[in-house]
Amino acid sequence: MRSLIICSALCTVLFAAAPGVFSQQPIPSPRDSVFLSLDTNVISVNYGRPSMRGRKIMGGLVPWNEVWRTGANQATHLKTSFDMTFGGIPVTRGTYTLWTLPSPGGWKVILNKQTGQWGTVYNASQDLARFDATVEQTSSAFETFTIALKATGKTSGVMMLMWENTSVSVPFQKSDHIRPLSGGDSTELTLGGKKAAIRYSRPYMRGRAIWGVVVPNDSVWRTGANLATSLTTEGDVTIGGSSVPAGSYTLYSIPSANALTLIISKKPGGREPAYDPKSDIARIIMKQERAPSSIDPFRIWFERDGTSGGTLNIGWGDRFFSAHVAAK
């Protein structure tokens, strides 16, 4: 009986102490934030901080030549209250996710427009920019992954990523004259239960005359910027009355004074534009209309028209062009 009482008392003490014991256990990859104020502006990074714990990091836990979340758990987020050049790339104020592509020969830093996701959810089509970073080997090791922000001037600084014996640095500078990049975007429409999707880049006007100048008349245009604009459809469709079988295509166009001829090429999109007229499967005359307000940046979008089909629209500046789309 005495033994039972002693055992019961010991169990009570242990259970009473357990919350305190467990609460003292270290979190494997705690969340942290680092901030830097430049004049009246702020840049910050929120990230998870994994530790080495005897493991090989570079080329091991962090594989070479694979996109890394640059931290742990939720994706690493960078927020800036000012327009800046970041690694020499123009970046407008806002929130982005920060990724890296480590390799033995150098590192690339990636800014991505998708935010709020877990660190294993990376969508390359949402990349704002990729650029090379400066990499150095340190004599002493960093046990815990660390991101630091350091001022180098009144409106400039450097971001440092440090873990194991590797230090990666990216300079940044406030800028009041940012030239926006032609970021990627997409639009989709469900037709007959199957999706049609377009991926493209969105150049800005930047005070320039567009039609007949930036986009010359009577010449083949990539219909966007950067990589070729792509159309992917899960089912057979018609665009402007022309048949387009299910598949992946590149979109080109030929502007004129009063219309836009949309070209659908059987070459898959998403690569460097290389127009070949032998690959055309359709040429569609799109109706031109005046835009009620300026369209900037360039935009491609689908609209459902109240039937089983919809409208494909392409617009920039003071005009847009449209064609009916439907399941075949």
Image (cartoon, grey):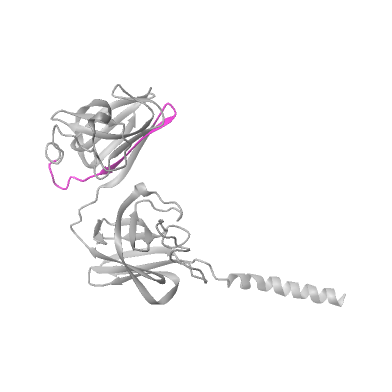
Would residue 305 be seen by someone viewing this image from the given angle? no
Of 47 and 110, the residue lying toward us: 110
**Quarter location, residue 322:** top left
Would residue 43 be seen by someone viewing this image from the given angle? yes
Q: Position of residue 38 (x, y in %)?
A: 26, 69
Q: Position of residue 121 (x, y in %)?
A: 44, 51
Q: What residue lies at 30% left-to-right and 42% top-to-bottom? A: 271
Of 277 and 203, the residue lying toward us: 277
Of 298 and 252, the residue lying toward us: 252
Residue 115 against residue 304 in the figure, above or below: below
On-image quarter of the C terminus: top left
Q: Position of residue 71 (x, y in %)?
A: 43, 63
Q: Position of residue 133 (x, y in %)?
A: 30, 63
Residue 291 against residue 328 in the figure, above or below: below
Magenta stretch: residue 45 in it? no
**Boundaries of the magenta span:** 190-209
Of 172 and 176, the residue lying toward us: 172
**Quarter location, residue 99:** bottom left
In the picture, measured across the screen, residue 121 lies left or right of residue 86, that is right
**Quarter location, residue 175:** bottom left
The number of callouts visible is 0
Q: What residue lies at 46% left-to-right and 58% top-to-bottom? A: 74
Q: What residue lies at 33% left-to-right and 59% top-to-bottom? A: 108
